[in-house]
Image (tube, grey):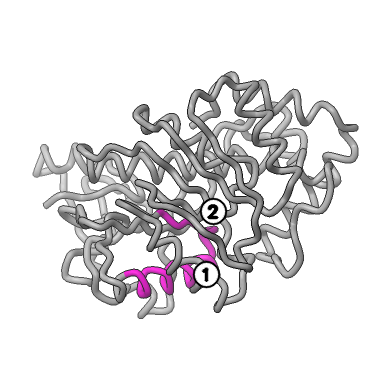
């Protein structure tokens, strides 16, 4: 997955305004903090951090959000998403991803505490030709927020920066603002998943249906086993991205955990593949989260040609229909 060309050029123009050495140092700091899951203080503290985020974190966050919105579209193909609310919007990353998946999107409300992010978000939208009407509001989610009804509400890589009580309050308020769907995403780490699992339980208790990734509303079997449910999204690295991160590969894999809740459900029909399929000579092994609320392992042999072809195409995070 890659950024749209105009958006990529707009980001390159912004990051090019600062000395490369400063941006590289800031990129190393951000990468270290994300790996450590350290959000005890704001991760973005200056212009160099913002430039580094645009270069190395924006593409990953965009790719993950686009993947989740694609899954929502797949699960509820008749749904029309005309309005979006992004809580803790940063530079508007989720909006750019939603604009690619929901052509019917007309209006977005973005709430962000950092004034510089708001300015950058507006600049990127203008430079990249974003057509949606985007209304920015400055506000700290910890202090509460007001919002009207929106078809889709997004909380993307935000809960990890909040206390448990504040995160719970944000989730409850966000659900009340969601006319149709609420999507929450966190890093694909044990800590990130624990926040998603808590959000899932709270939403189910509030009467929400689970659209993705879960094929059931029972207790998460991976959480019960001390494991964590997460997925992976591959994204293209630009030359600048590779230089700042000191990598040689032209891609990277972003691990993430997520939940999409809906007013009407649109439950998964089948099971969810929760590990990389194991490909062997003559058979493929799938690890599935099933509608019975259990983790099951299924072996698909070459003797069943049609199912074997389907298993060869299947990937981690896909739905496996029985």
Q: Residues within 10 Å of mark 2 (few under 14, many from 20)?
A: many
Please provide the residue range marked out in magenta. Answer: 183-203
Residue in the foreground of this view, choosing between 294 and 260: 260
Q: Secondary structure at mark 1?
A: helix
Q: Secondary structure at mark 2?
A: strand
Label 2 – label 1 distance at C-alpha = 23 Å
Residue plotted at (25% across, 62% down): 209
Compared with residue 145, is residue 269 higher up or lower down, i.e. above or below? above
Residue 194 within the segment the image draws in magenta: yes
Q: Position of residue 140 (x, y in %)?
A: 65, 60
Q: How many marks?
A: 2
**Residue tagged 1:** 190
Quadrant housing residue 206: bottom left
User: Which tag is nearer the camera, tag 2 or tag 1?
Assistant: 2
Q: Residues within 10 Å of mark 1 (few under 14, many from 20)?
A: some
Left or right of 315? Residue 196 is right
Residue plotted at (64% across, 56% down): 139
Secondary structure, magenta segment, majority class: helix
Q: Position of residue 45 (x, y in %)?
A: 81, 53
Q: Which numbered disc, 2 or 1, marks the residue that appears first in the sequence? A: 2
Left or right of 322? Residue 100 is right
**Residue tagged 2:** 87
Compared with residue 24, is residue 32 higher up or lower down, i.e. above or below? below
Compared with residue 45, is residue 124 higher up or lower down, i.e. above or below? above
Q: Position of residue 21 (x, y in %)?
A: 90, 37
Residue 110: mark: none
Residue in the foreground of this view, choosing between 239 and 186: 186
């Amino acid at each position: 997955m890659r950024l749209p060309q105009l958006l990529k050029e707009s980001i390159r123009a912004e990051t090019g305004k600062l000395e490369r050495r400063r941006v590289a140092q800031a990129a190393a700091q951000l990468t270290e903090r994300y790996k450590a899951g350290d959000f005890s203080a704001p991760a973005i503290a200056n212009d160099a951090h913002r430039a580094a985020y645009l270069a190395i974190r924006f593409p990953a966050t965009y790719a993950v959000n686009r993947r989740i919105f694609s899954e929502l579209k797949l699960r509820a193909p008749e749904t029309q998403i005309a309005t979006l609310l992004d809580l803790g919007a940063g530079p508007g990353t989720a909006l750019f991803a939603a604009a690619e998946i929901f052509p019917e999107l007309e209006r977005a409300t973005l709430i962000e505490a950092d004034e510089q992010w708001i300015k950058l978000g507006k600049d990127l939208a203008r430079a990249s030709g974003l057509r949606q009407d985007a209304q920015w509001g400055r506000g700290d989610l910890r202090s509460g927020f007001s919002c009207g009804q929106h078809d889709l509400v997004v909380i993307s890589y935000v809960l990890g920066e909040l206390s448990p009580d504040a995160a719970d309050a944000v989730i409850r308020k966000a659900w009340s603002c969601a006319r149709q769907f609420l999507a929450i995403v966190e890093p694909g780490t044990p800590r990130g998943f624990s926040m998603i699992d808590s959000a899932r339980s709270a939403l189910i208790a509030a009467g929400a249906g689970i659209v993705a990734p879960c094929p059931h509303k029972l207790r998460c079997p991976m959480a019960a086993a001390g494991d964590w449910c997460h997925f992976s999204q591959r994204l293209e690295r630009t030359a600048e991205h590779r230089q700042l991160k000191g990598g040689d590969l032209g891609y990277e894999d972003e691990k993430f955990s997520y939940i999409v809740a809906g007013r009407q459900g649109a439950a998964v029909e089948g099971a969810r593949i929760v590990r990389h399929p194991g490909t062997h000579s003559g058979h493929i092994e799938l690890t599935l989260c099933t509608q019975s609320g259990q983790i099951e392992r299924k072996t698909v042999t070459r003797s069943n040609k049609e199912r074997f072809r389907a298993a060869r195409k299947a990937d981690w995070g896909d739905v496996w229909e029985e």
